[in-house]
Image: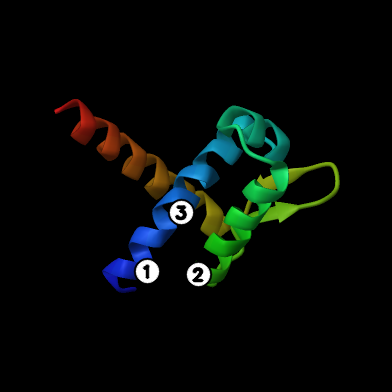
Amino acid sequence: MDTNKLITLLPEMAIFVVVIEEGSFSKAADRLGVAPSSVSRSISKLESALNKKLLERTTRNMRLSTSGEQIYSLCVDMLKSARLATDA
């Protein structure tokens, strides 16, 4: 993936981490100060760009797919690195 496309996905990767930390789209939306539909669109955009299903969703439950687990871990590392960079 080229750098320009990657840069546009960074916010979606951060939103993905918040969704997993909060356990739901609506709680993530509250934390981020956006509408739940915006969070849902961000996750869909990320899944499309990566061509991977990150979450297995039902009306009452959500869990990480196998690919989602790996990508979540990498996104957490990305956010930690960003925090370290801003603190440097």
At numbered mark 2, what does the secondary structure look like: helix, strand or loop?
helix
Depicted 42 relative to depicted 87: above or below: below
Q: What residue type is disc 2 on?
A: Ala
Q: What residue type is disc 1 on?
A: Lys
Residue 33 lies in quadrant: top right
> Residue 4, position in %: x, y?
31, 68
Q: Earlier in the sequence, mark 3 or mark 2?
A: 2
For the residues bearing labels 1 and 3, Cβ distance under 8 angstroms: no
Q: Earlier in the sequence, mark 1 or mark 3?
A: 1
Residue 35 lies in quadrant: top right
Which residue is depicted at the point 72% across and 36% down? 26
What is the basis of the colouring in this image? rainbow
Task: Look at mark 3 in the image and give the residue it sits on.
Answer: 71
Residue 60 lies in quadrant: top right
Position of residue 2 in the picture relative to residue 44 (left or right):
left
Residue depth check, mark 1 versus mark 3: number of the one nearer the observer: 1
Where residue 49 is drawn, which disc sits there? 2
Task: Look at mark 1 in the image and give the residue it sits on.
Answer: 5
Position of residue 64 in the picture relative to residue 46 (left or right):
right
